Image (tube, helix red, strand yellow):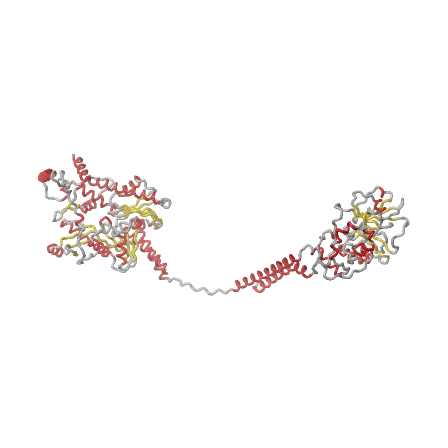
């Protein structure tokens, strides 16, 4: 049995087979810390909120952390800040490992494919913040052979089945943007740009003065409130109705243009255009892709960045949050079939 | 075709190839080899470069025979005169040429008519005017026996064609196919008959035949008439031996005793006669004219044995004509090569036969049955493929499973994540001359903050406050955004 694991900056999602259906497990990738006092302990116990403890603090994970942050004016701490493992933060690393292990299926599995915000093929040297290596080692401790998966390629596997898994995949994430070109499921080029929708939210939060203060008077940028507003107000990127939406639109437009320009430069430098000739379909996945009018802005960015591909169709992935995880699951099952035939 | 029959056929083909390749070798190897001991040495270097023209004269003449000359123009009267013809006006002669029909002409015409090469002139006198050299012998001309016509002297007791050709060491078929004066005849031969040979003759057998008169020069140097000693040494049919090279024969191992031979015979085989010294001793004055001719061959004849007039010796000479061309060492190597080729062909044939039989008779083991996947496995694969296709197409529903996050676990270390999220206010520059300005700026800010009523409400209301304190404006971007906001509100 195999499963697909999508470790994103906003959440960790796992998808595996359960009979004739798929079963998904996900958890938001943030937590809150409370002072380790007696009153906080009593509060958490009376509210029946599961919590853990560390030196001088209590830690609450998942959705409970979001509710607690909203009620107690506590900042949400990202488990994977900027899509990386936190450095010099042992508690943060333990929280990341705990979160990943919590979404794994309870059944016995032997193979997994892991999509991470930053792919090791991006050319960056391995460091202590390499999330992919961390996840693979973590799964290996449980006897699971895991392979890394680029988010763009995973989106192609998940959404371009009717095109023989051939096309261009763009995964718009919270902290990164993944770009991939694949033919028949085999990636030709995989690129990642370190800019996501969180950057847009931060600018909006700063521009709108979205801050919150803890009981000690420390100020925090309330990015979560901007994200909540963006999700609840149904921001239309093609026809903004107010200044905030206009600001979001302009920031998203600049973000996409910057990402596409960088992809264009790297494509021309990689000299893979001859292999990528004939690819006409692009799929967009990720949380930001669900915003209304995102496909229009992507098409505008492709045109303005002069992407050297003749894109005739831009698909927006389904609203499911498990799109990348489904692509990882497809890759894992393909590898499992190949391994089974090799053994036979 | 069964394998055995095909095998026999292959073997037969191989044997046939071997026989075909070894036949020339065997014929060459089993025949008497030429060793150079009994070679006849003929030197034609003294002959004139021009091809001599020969004429045969028989009939009522004193010296019948074959005459040759290198002159371009020869009248028939000259030839007849050289042969000792005493024909008078009114007599006639008949001439033959190369088997053509005979033509008669008058002696008178002989003064103006040129003799053609290989003409056979038969002089017929109304009555004989001279006595022949031997009353018991008669002469006939034979065309086709050699390249040029020859004149044969026969005793009176041998007047039949069979006897004639037996004397010439020819087969009886030659006599059967010969014609006398243009017609088939079984009558006894007579003087002046012209015999045309139509069959193949063994010309090499003529070398030792003493009945053939030697060729004489039409104009002898000393004008000695028909002297036998004045004739040149190489009197035997020259074209037959024209291709015989000059050989350096090895010294003889055993010298055969010299035989005293008649002068006539010595003159005929002067090229290799062992009694040459005797002849020279007894007829030294007569041989003075011949010395220049015989000088070149005198030295080589010392090491050459006498040619025996036996069939065996003749056979040896017969083979010498062509065997002398090929050295003995080369013959051995060629024979070895041919034998090797034959053996190789035989080996190749046997190998092909073995290969064919081996391949035909080879028995392959029974193929091991390949385990066929069971139906269950196939159905499982089919089902898995169908489910996989559904997965790729996104047709499978996703059920969200609640995740129970771990609780009551003890984490090691201090939580530093929240501290890193704190946004610190911009630090004012500290210094003695900035203290007053900073203090006044703080007082102004406090005043401004107090002037703006902060209503109880959501944080969004705070964001929408038109005037912000300097505490909130930090960084270039914030100031720019604040300016844009103010401009927009105006």
Residue A80, visible in the rendered structure: yes
Q: Position of residue A17 (x, y in %)?
A: 28, 57
Q: Position of residue A293 (x, y in %)?
A: 26, 42
Residue placed at 84% from the left, 41% from the top? Answer: B112
| B19 relative position to B288: left or right | left
| B72 relative position to B421: left or right | right
Q: Quadrant of the C terminus of chain A?
A: bottom left
Q: Which of the two residues, A233 or B105, is positioned nearer the viewer here?
A: B105
Q: Quadrant of the N terminus of chain A?
A: bottom left
Answer with the quarter of the image where residue B205 lies: bottom right
Q: Which of the two residues, B118 or A21, is positioned nearer the viewer here?
A: B118
Residue B175, visible in the rendered structure: no
Residue placed at 64% from the left, 56% from the top? Answer: B330
Q: Position of residue B363 (x, y in %)?
A: 50, 65
Q: Position of residue A103 (x, y in %)?
A: 23, 56
Total marks shown come to 0
| B431 relative position to A97: left or right | left
Answer with the quarter of the image where residue B465 lies: top left
From the viewer's perspective, is residue A165 above or below residue B315?
above
Q: Which of the two residues, B452 or A290, is positioned nearer the viewer here?
A: B452
């Amino acid at each position: 049995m195999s499963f697909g694991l999508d470790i994103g900056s906003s959440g960790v999602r796992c998808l595996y087979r359960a009979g004739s259906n798929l079963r998904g497990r996900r958890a938001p990738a943030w937590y809150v810390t409370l002072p380790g006092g007696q009153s906080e302990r009593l509060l958490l116990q009376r509210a029946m909120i599961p919590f853990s403890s560390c030196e001088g603090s209590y830690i609450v994970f998942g959705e409970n952390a979001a509710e607690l942050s909203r009620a107690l004016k506590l900042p949400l701490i990202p488990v994977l800040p900027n899509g990386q493992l936190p450095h010099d933060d042992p508690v943060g690393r333990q929280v990341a490992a705990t979160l990943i292990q919590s979404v794994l299926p309870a059944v016995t599995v032997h193979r997994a494919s892991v999509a991470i915000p930053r792919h090791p093929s991006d050319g960056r040297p391995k460091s202590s913040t390499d999330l992919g290596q961390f996840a693979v080692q973590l799964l290996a401790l449980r006897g699971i052979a895991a392979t890394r998966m680029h988010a763009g390629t995973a989106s192609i596997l998940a959404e371009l089945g009717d095109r023989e898994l051939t096309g261009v995949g763009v995964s718009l994430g919270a902290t990164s943007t993944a770009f991939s070109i694949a033919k028949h499921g085999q990636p030709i080029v995989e690129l990642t740009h370190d800019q996501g929708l969180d950057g847009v939210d931060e600018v909006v939060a700063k521009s709108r003065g979205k801050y919150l203060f803890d009981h000690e008077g420390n100020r925090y940028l309330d990015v979560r409130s901007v994200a909540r507003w963006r999700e609840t107000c149904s921001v239309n990127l093609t026809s903004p109705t107010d200044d905030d939406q206009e600001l979001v639109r302009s920031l998203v437009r600049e973000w996409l243009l910057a990402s596409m320009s960088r992809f264009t430069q790297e494509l021309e430098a990689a000299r893979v255009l001859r292999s990528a000739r004939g690819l006409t379909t692009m799929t967009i996945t990720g949380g930001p892709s669900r915003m209304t009018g995102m496909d229009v802005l992507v098409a505008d960015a492709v045109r303005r960045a002069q992407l050297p591909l003749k894109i005739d169709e831009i698909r927006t992935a389904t609203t499911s949050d498990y799109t990348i995880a489904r692509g990882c699951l497809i890759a894992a099952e393909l590898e499992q079939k190949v391994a089974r035939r090799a053994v036979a | 075709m069964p394998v055995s029959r095909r095998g026999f056929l292959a073997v037969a083909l191989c044997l046939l190839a071997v026989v075909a390749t070894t036949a020339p070798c065997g014929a060459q190897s089993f025949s008497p080899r030429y060793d150079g001991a009994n070679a006849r040495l003929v030197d034609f270097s003294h002959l004139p470069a021009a091809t001599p023209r020969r004429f045969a004269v028989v009939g009522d003449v004193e010296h019948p025979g074959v005459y040759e000359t290198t002159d371009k123009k020869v009248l028939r009267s000259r030839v007849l005169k050289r042969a000792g013809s005493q024909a008078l006006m009114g007599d006639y002669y008949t001439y033959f040429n190369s088997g053509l029909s005979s033509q008669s002409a008058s002696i008178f015409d002989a003064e103006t008519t040129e003799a053609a090469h290989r003409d056979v002139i038969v002089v017929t006198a109304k009555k004989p005017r001279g006595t022949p050299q031997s009353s018991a012998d008669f002469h006939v001309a034979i065309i086709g026996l050699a390249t040029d016509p020859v004149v044969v002297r026969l005793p009176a007791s041998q007047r039949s064609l069979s006897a004639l050709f037996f004397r010439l060491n020819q087969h009886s078929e030659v006599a059967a196919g010969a014609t006398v004066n243009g017609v088939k005849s079984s009558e006894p031969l007579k003087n002046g008959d012209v015999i045309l040979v139509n069959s193949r003759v063994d010309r090499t057998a003529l070398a030792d035949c003493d009945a053939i008169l030697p060729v004489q020069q039409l104009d002898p140097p000393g004008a000695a008439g028909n002297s036998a000693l004045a004739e040149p040494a190489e009197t035997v049919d020259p074209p037959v031996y024209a291709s015989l090279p000059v050989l350096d024969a090895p010294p003889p191992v055993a010298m055969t005793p010299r035989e005293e031979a008649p002068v006539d015979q010595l003159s005929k085989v002067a090229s290799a006669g062992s009694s040459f010294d005797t002849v020279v001793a007894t007829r030294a004055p007569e041989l003075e004219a011949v010395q220049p001719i015989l000088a070149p061959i005198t030295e080589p004849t010392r090491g050459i044995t006498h040619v025996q007039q036996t069939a065996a010796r003749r056979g040896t000479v017969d083979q010498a004509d062509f065997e002398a061309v090929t050295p003995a060492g080369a013959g051995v190597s060629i024979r070895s090569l041919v034998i090797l080729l034959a053996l190789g062909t035989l080996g190749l044939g046997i190998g092909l036969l073995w290969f064919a039989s081996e391949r035909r008779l080879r028995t392959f083991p029974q193929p091991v049955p390949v385990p066929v996947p069971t139906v269950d496995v196939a159905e499982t694969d089919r089902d898995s493929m169908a489910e996989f296709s559904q997965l790729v197409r996104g047709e499978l529903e996703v059920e969200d499973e609640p995740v129970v996050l771990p609780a009551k676990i003890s984490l090691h270390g201090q939580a530093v994540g929240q501290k890193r999220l704190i946004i610190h206010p911009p630090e004012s520059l500290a210094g003695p001359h900035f203290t007053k300005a900073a203090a006044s700026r703080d007082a102004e800010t406090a005043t401004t903050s107090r002037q703006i009523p902060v209503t109880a409400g959501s944080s969004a209301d705070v964001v929408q406050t038109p005037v912000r304190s300097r505490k909130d404006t930090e960084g270039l971007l914030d100031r720019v955004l604040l300016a844009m906001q103010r401009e927009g509100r105006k």
